[in-house]
Amino acid sequence: MQTFILLFRGINVGGNNKLPMKELKALLSELGYQQVQSYIQSGNVVLKATSVDIDLIGQRIAQQFGFTPKIMPLTTDALSQSITNNPYSSFAGNTVQFYFCQQTPSFNEDKATDLATNGEEFLLVDKVLYLHAPNGIGRSKLAAKLEDYLGVSTTVRNLNTVEKLKALTDTA
């Protein structure tokens, strides 16, 4: 058995795609996953399994909740490596974003550089783009366009969340 991290994209945002974590944990347990833990309502799950069937999980969520979420599975090694590779670890955790990419991106770095303002910095390492946005991502034009510039589907978590997920994997 190994520990997996599941990152759900676009759930419980603005009243759309409601997926209560208590019910999600129960669904995952029914599917045979063990030691299922969630962290905050934005769709972060840590569980133990021999493997993870993202398609089956998506189908069951569609049956029960009426939508199919995008789910990105990570191994503990991949999560640990993303933390190790973070070039902005000395900054406040809510100002550093991890863009986890489904596939290797075809990143348009020039366009991203043109939009970076107010001390924003970014670096792509393998399949994770790191963004330091000192003034937050809420008004960042760069943050709003990064997925387009990466050219692949992503899900974003801030450094605080990534570190909390790592702590959960250490206790799983």
Image (tube, rainbow, N blue to C red):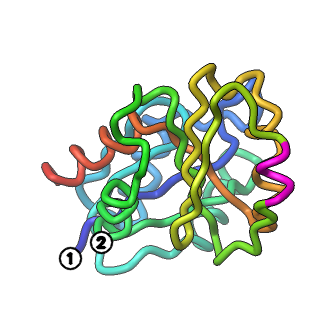
Tell me what residue is drawn at x 31 percent, y 45 percent: 37
- Quick check: 127 left or right of 92? right
- Quick check: 119 left or right of 164? right
At label 2, counting other C-alpha atoms closer than 10 Å, the crowd grade (few under 14, some 14-19, many 20 or more) is some
Q: Which mark is residue 1?
A: 1
What residue is shown with label 2? 49
Q: Which mark is residue 157?
A: none
The amino acid type, in three-letter code, at marker 2 is Ala
Tell me what residue is drawn at x 34 percent, y 65 percent: 81
The amino acid type, in three-letter code, at marker 1 is Met
Quadrant where the N terminus sits is bottom left
Position in image of residue 118 (x %, y %): 69, 25
Do tag 1 and tag 2 residues touch (Cβ < 8 Å)?
yes
> Quadrant location of residue 141?
top right
- Tally of marks: 2
Q: Nearer the viewer, residue 124 or 82?
A: 124
Q: Nearer the viewer, residue 75 or 62?
A: 75
Position in image of residue 136 (x %, y %): 62, 23
The secondary structure type at the circle numbered 2 is: strand
Highlighted magenta segment, given as a residue range: 110-114
The secondary structure type at the circle numbered 1 is: loop
The mark that comes first in sequence, 1 or 2, is 1
Position in image of residue 140 (x %, y %): 76, 29
Instruction: Assess whether residue 124 is covered by the magenta stretch.
Output: no
Quadrant where the C terminus sits is bottom left
Position in image of residue 121 (x %, y %): 61, 42
C-alpha gap between disc 1 and disc 2? 5 Å
Classified by dominant secondary structure, the portion drawn in magenta counts as helix
- Quick check: 10 left or right of 133? right
Q: Nearer the viewer, residue 66 or 92?
A: 92
Tell me what residue is drawn at x 38 percent, y 60 percent: 85
- Quick check: 50 left or right of 72? left
